[in-house]
Amino acid sequence: MSETKKTTIVLFSGEYDKAMAAYIIANGAAAYDHEVTIFHTFWGLNALRKEELVSVKKGLLEKLFGKMMPRGADKMGISKMNFAGFGPKMIKHVIQKHNAMTLPQLIDLAQEQDIKLVACTMTMDLLGLQQEELIEDIEYAGVAAYLADAQDGNVNLFI
Amino acid sequence: MIQTDMVVDAKGLACPMPIVKTRKAMKELASGNVMEVQATDKGSTADLKAWATSAGHQYLGTTEQDGTLTHYVRKSNSDEIQDKTYPYVVSNEELETLLTNRAEIVLLDVREEAEYAFGHIPGAKSVPLGDLDADLSMDKDSLIYVICRSGSRSDLAAQKLTNAGFVNVINVVPGMSGWNGVLEKSM
């Protein structure tokens, strides 16, 4: 086989379904023996949040942001038919019915397959998220690190 | 039932799990061996075919029974690029002419059972290279043509047969990978 191919995905969106699509493609690409990077920025960072409340020192605005955004992948809403939280319940029900994987499971699988999960540090500052609030074994970087992976990538997606 | 070296059960699993599981299991499989992947995901046929091709493995085919798809994949074998050393060879076309003229020959297909099942020359006898030692019941003088996919395994088989005392052994080059004649399936 030739040299390793690369897939890079920018996860900008904070919705359950969009994040799910990103993680399914990422896991598929890893099975293709691609080197995969998911760069989480803006609302996509919420997929990396720990579910439990982590007490860190924050200003008022950051605290508010933290409260208003979903804490962890499982709490995310969906992009269509959210119906104030009823939509995600429905989608999780059909996921179970069809034996598909839930978003938290897909994230676990991604880590198992050595997919590089990167949190954008600039947007972490904007949204007031701190490293302690995000899951373990992820990397922290900015746009240059992302571009270094993306410029010789074979698949680049923005979701 | 087609004999395989490894079975991966991905029944009931949705995309992307069949591929993720196959890839994991493929690492354990010895090269040249055949794996069967059982899945119920309808997209798995296209997925597995594309994945195998991209990873350099050989996708053999898929059967379906009671809603379960069984895919057969043979792990790529880097040994097959090696030089062929057995001196007596014929081309595919020459073999085809012999078969059309109904010549008195024994045609041995030394590929894996699954490869044979998804397409072989009518009248060819399946004896996978690994089982060749156990199956040397033919007449020592019979005219034996050995065929595989690329001519490498049949090269080894021809040498083995010659060493075992067979006197008329001929390798078909390149073999099934370049075969345009009639094919038969056995499933």
Image (cartoon, rainbow, N blue to C red):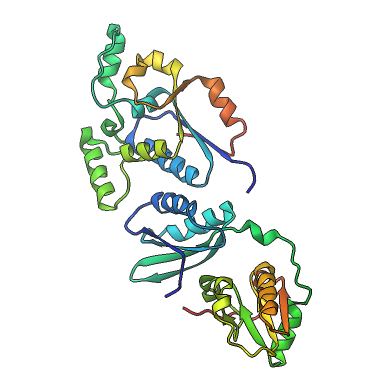
| Residue in the image at 78% along x and 77% along y | B88
| Residue in the image at 41% along x and 54% along y | B18
Name the one closer to the observer, B20 or B87: B87
**Image check: A92 left or right of B106?**
left
Q: Position of residue B21 (x, y in %)?
A: 41, 51
| Residue in the image at 33% along x and 18% along y | A132
Q: Position of residue A30 (x, y in %)?
A: 48, 42
Q: Position of residue A44 (x, y in %)?
A: 39, 28
Q: In this view of the protein, can residue B179 be seen by the observer?
A: no
Name the one closer to the observer, B159 or B103: B159
When the figure is inspected, residue B25 is found, relative to residue B139, above or below; the finding is above
When the figure is inspected, residue A103 is found, relative to residue B33, above or below; the finding is above
Name the one closer to the observer, A103 or B149: B149
| Residue in the image at 70% along x and 79% along y | B162
Q: Furthest-right residue in view?
A: B87
Q: In this view of the protein, can residue B54 be seen by the observer?
A: yes
Work out which quarter of the rendered image holds the C terminus of chain A and state it. top left
**Image check: B48 left or right of B64?**
right
Q: How many marks?
A: 0
When the figure is inspected, residue B171 is found, relative to residue B101, above or below; the finding is above
Q: Position of residue B13 (x, y in %)?
A: 34, 54
